[in-house]
Amino acid sequence: MEKRKLMRGSIALAEGAITAGCRYYFGYPITPQNEISEHLSARLPEVGGVFIQAESEIASINMVLGAASCGARAMTSSSGPGISLMQEGLSYLAGSELPALVVNITRIGPGLGGISACQGDYWQATRGGGHGDYRLIVLAPNSVQEMHDLAIKALHLADQYRNPAMILADAILGQMMEPVNLDPPPVEIPAKPWALTGARGRKPQLVKSLYLADGEMEKHNWHMYEKYQRLQEAEVMVEMDLEEHMDLLLVSFGSCSRMVNSAVALARSRGYRVGHIRPVTLFPFPGDAIREVSRCVGKVLTVEMNTGQMWDDVRLSVYPGCQCRLLARPGGAIPSPKQILEEIEKYIKAGDLLAKSVR
Amino acid sequence: MQKVFARPATLLETGFHFCPGCHHGIVHRLLCEMLERYNLQEKAVGVPGVGCGVFLYDYIAIDVCEAPHGRATAVATGIKRVQPDHFVFTYQGDGDLGAIGTAEVIHAANRGENFTVIFVNNSVYGMTGGQMAPTTLLGQYTTTSPAGRDSRNDGYPLHLAEMLAPLEGVAFAARVSLHTPAHVKKARRALQRAFETQLEKRGFSFMEFVSACPTNWHLTTLQSVEHIEQKMLSVFPLGIYKNTAAATVRKEGEPADALL
Amino acid sequence: MSRITIREEGCKGCSYCVLACKRKLIRIDQDRINNLGYNPAVFSDNNEEPCTGCALCAEICPEVLIEVYRQQGRVGA
């Protein structure tokens, strides 16, 4: 019997992490993510785990680093300003090849910004706000169910590729409530022979990111690069709602994609032939899918709740010659389905400014 | 003929990278002696911060997790909470602990985290070339206090042992020195108390080692010993500032109990 | 006789052992440079006041290079 429960996004994510065997949470209060910490402060002791409210996000991410170095599944959650403080720690986690789950319930910014939702941390998440050649595995849920499921998936990918993984959600997803199917896929945590469990019956082991000898870091950088290539080849997650023939392709992610879904339905009801691609993994980005689909659709409309960030990746990915437009609403503004529909109509009716779109 | 002193087995053969007369090497040796005394080599995890002590893993044969600058006590918190029955210690210098890591050490102490902090106080930033540290003496020349540390601009030397001792989570806090053999013996006994504090799960233990940094003090090694004797120890009085295992618990402000 | 050995190749000439030895049995060899480029400390016993194996030198060596052998039962003799 499917176990469904009406849950808030943050709680669903926290329960997903627990289901995935995460037993260590270190965090610091910041709106709009507090529900995660508050829930785990009660739940983790129940499941034999540890919850610490640290003195800062900097301390939090480093506690995660410590716990991860022992092979434990550990996580933290925060929002923009806190995630910014964690950037050095994330770079160390990647450089030390440690798995960890970091959740960003994005809020408006920059600076103190505000507590409502936006998608302005896309660049920071996908381009890595920290120093050095590294990437974060970034998953962007668009429903409470995905908050639960992608937390499990993120912890799995982090372990599998020994790299920090981020859930990029936002205040909407954190606060909204939807029914969630709590029947988890079987979870098995891979063995971690590299973990610092004490040099008993083996040579001492080291978790570090310092590489001073000649050529050592270059080797390490390419080793990490190879990991990111494998991720790109094997772990892209993308949702595609396409039609046989399309005049316009929309691209959006996260909670914004819910509005785009409604707009697409409205547009189709008015006879417009539109498709929608929703990246679920922001890294690895579904560039190939967008290139493939856009080959036979001359126009692409990116819809984002920021001033245009994923828009860069879309333009990098579309088939050459495709026309790209952006509908951007930053600062907590939410594009309504109606507004998106108007943009769809305007864009389709604009005719082919270019030569016949490439078939 | 009996061998009465030898290099501890846990101290690897690789020669130290430390400068001549630097006391880091002695701290490493004392750590190895204690690790062996309590048979901890197979269940110890060292957490060096960033500074001259970062290469702990090249010298001590235990598992090591390298912490970002200033965050060793947070990393150690994570490790100790995952593996409470492991022996966990941080190894940090003036900058790592006394400057960027102050918040982390205060809150780890305040949470009573059951691990041991090794703090090497040589009153400068060694690895980066001798900049002023929070523990730099007034009037001391460093590359960032070229006219000598001036309290009006640079504040005063920070007293970590005294600052942390009053926190209820702290079970042991001491400051020792290494500039004479007698002081090294006392330092070893104090370090043993710190190890026992962790092994008996009494809470946070803190060991501050006053150490020489001839290179960045611009003194010879023997002048450095004098500098410690005549200048540092008056600013950084030695002693056990807290020991919850001791019969009488020292009241705040009382002079520290004499080192045993 | 009690005695010490110094791994001279690791010595950085800091002279702490020279300072520590009550009987002045250790000196810095000014005529030799070791692989590290330092004048190493060398031990030379003398019959009047021989080494007692007190290990003060070993206790203070920052490079942990000194091993100490003590003649049984004759400490300080």
Image (cartoon, rainbow, N blue to C red):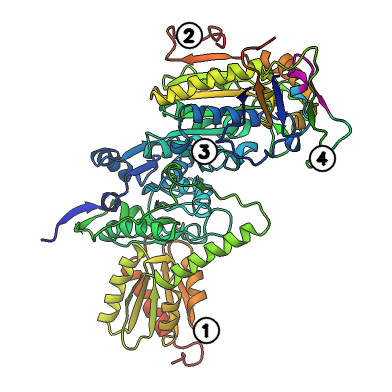
Contact between labelled residues 2 and 3, with CB atoms less than 8 Å apart: no
Given this view, does label 3 or label 2 mark the residue nearer the observer?
3
Q: Quadrant of the C terminus of chain C?
A: top right
Q: Secondary structure at mark 4?
A: loop
Report in which chain the residue with disc 4 lies.
C
Task: Return the x and y of residue A22 as percentages of the image width and height.
Answer: 32, 48
Which of A108/A138 is in front? A138
Q: Hey, what amino acid is under mark 2?
A: Arg
Task: Return the x and y of residue C11 as percentages of the image width and height.
Answer: 75, 34
User: In the current view of this chain or complex, which residue is farthest to the right?
Assistant: C31
Do callouts 1 and 2 point to residues on the same chain?
no
Q: Which residues are magenta?
A: C18-28
Disc 1: CA contacts within 10 A as few (<14), some (14-19) or many (>=20):
few
Q: Quadrant of the N terminus of chain C?
A: top right
Q: Secondary structure at mark 3?
A: strand
Report in which chain the residue with disc 3 lies.
B
Q: Is residue A352 left or right of residue C77?
A: left
Q: Quadrant of residue A258?
A: bottom left
> Which residue lies under the disc numbered 4?
C37
Q: Which residue is painted at 27% across and 42% down in the image?
A: A39
Given this view, does label 3 or label 4 mark the residue nearer the observer?
4
Q: Hey, what amino acid is under mark 3?
A: Val
Q: Quadrant of residue B144?
A: top right
> Which residue lies under the disc numbered 1?
A320
> Which residue lies under the disc numbered 2?
B250
Cα distance between the residues tagged 1 and 3: 51 Å
